Amino acid sequence: MLDSNIMNNNDEINVDVKYIEDLPEEILLRIFRYLPPYEDYASIRLVCRQWERLWREIKTWRRDTFHNNLSLSTAPVSIHWHSIDPPTKFNLTPRFSHSVCYVDSKRMLYVFGGSRDMATSLNDFWRLDLSTRSWERILATGRYPPPKSSATFIDDENGNLILFGGRSMIYIDDIHIREQLHSELHSYSFERNSWSLHDNLNEPGPICDHSASMINVNNQKRMIVFGGNTGTREQPSPSQRTNDLWQWTDIHTNTWTMIQVDGIRPEPRKGHSQFTLNSENIFIVGGSSSTRFCHDVWLFSFQTNQWTQIPVNNPHPHDFAPNNDDSPYCMAIPSCILVTFGRIKRHPTENERNMYSQYDFSHCDKKSREELSLPPSSSSDESDEKTRYPVTTHKRSIIPSSIKTKYNMIEISGGFQIYRLDLSNIFSLNPCVTWLPSKCTSVFGSPTHSSLYYSLICARSELILFGGVEKRKLHLQKKLSENDIRYQSISGTLAFITISNIPL
């Protein structure tokens, strides 16, 4: 504190003032790491030439760090979750099987509809500003889509979002309800903030749980639709799975055409993921057929109009693959890695350590994991594992004292684990894909537990997970039945997931 006499005499005090421009570049780069890579990055590059140069460096560092940690399988990685609860001032209903579209040019994540429960569908329209992490409900005009879930929602890259298909529950009377599929195609215009309905008698018909992506074939953008659950106009309820391939031109011509496929086709399925690789190829992965859960990968070429199944380059196809459910995948570009999350699987066995000796399993040897001694997964490939590895007796699980007050065994065994599929050799002379060893055996602090029907998007150096159905075992609540202690709760949690030392 300054002396009062000095203050009264108004003597000048020399203070060594420092401005942000005087900071060393190393400090500025460190500060810029903590800025979200959206609007803030666009702003700092406009300050001066030095900041523009530093922006390019930090942008490259953030992208390379994120993708290298996803693709490199020889080192452990730390997964950081940052959860944001739904805003209290908005009625953002928790949901699952909703439609999500990420538009990088607007730095926005758009969410439409979904299901609130097994009997209620939604048609509210939201956008998430990734710069401020804030939600805003969009009040649009025009021909609004009906309440529905399990529809595809993609950007046509011409200023419109395309919403196609879906399903909803229709009340027949006060007691009975039935499931109805939708065949409508709606487009949302950013410029007019308006929905439009595009009718066409040649459309694929009522459909849900299908996949869609945009591709530029012969300098013409098309939406490609594959698979799903289909119905008929006379009976718009799910009747069978399909493996048909359709293309839609644009909102002006509004033309549907079924693509005639030569040769073999993927098994009819629903709940799969579809991605565009280039102007000539798309591929699908995952989903479920009428008899099994699918982990196969198929590539379609528009030059030959043929499907090709891409072999899995693991000694056993289920090694390091996710659990058997319809979990969504997202693609991290340019690392050519597919990412998904699933229930934690068992601890690696000695046979797996020897078989995959080129990989580093040191991250699996943490004290907490050794003390937990989690039993094997109960997935469908467990019977196959019993023939490959000797059956061992597992000790009773013990919760480490360091985490006893924060986690319990049910939460740990039901947490999320990252799974990665390497696509880098999909166009080689011997095309193949490879499931990479899991880079962490548990994700403490994950916002959901064995969640299904959530959305997963890869944005700028981060993954965005929203909604879903959480399966938990809660003994404090009333049981569904005497023999069933499983509970399902609808999640409204928004989670941002970064890899390694990238700040949130």
Image: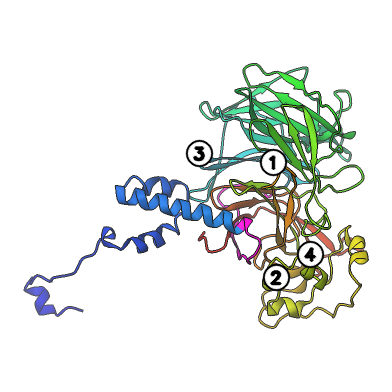
Q: Residue beneath label 4, please?
A: 345
Q: Residue beneath label 3, please?
A: 106
- Kindly indicate the quadrant of the structure image that contains residue 356: bottom right
How far, Cα to Cα, is label 2 from label 4? 15 Å
Type of amino acid at the residue the image marks with label 3: Lys
Q: Are marks 3 and 4 in contact (CB under 8 Å)?
A: no
Earlier in the chain: of badge 3 and badge 4, it is 3
Residue, x 58% and y 46% (percent of image)? Answer: 334
What stretch of residues is rendered in magenta?
70-95
Work out which quarter of the rendered image holds the N terminus and state it: bottom left
- 10 Å crowding of disc 3: few (<14), some (14-19), many (20+): few
How far, Cα to Cα, is label 2 from label 3? 40 Å
Q: Main secondary structure of the magenta part?
A: loop
Q: Residue beneath label 1, please?
A: 427
Pair 3/4: label in front: 4
Q: Are marks 2 and 3 in contact (CB under 8 Å)?
A: no
Residue, x 41% and y 57% (percent of image)? Answer: 32
How far, Cα to Cα, is label 1 from label 4? 30 Å
- Is 492 drawn above or below residue 168 in the view shown? below
Numbered disc 3: secondary structure:
helix
Q: Are marks 2 and 4 in contact (CB under 8 Å)?
A: no
How far, Cα to Cα, is label 2 from label 1? 29 Å
Q: Are marks 2 and 1 in contact (CB under 8 Å)?
A: no
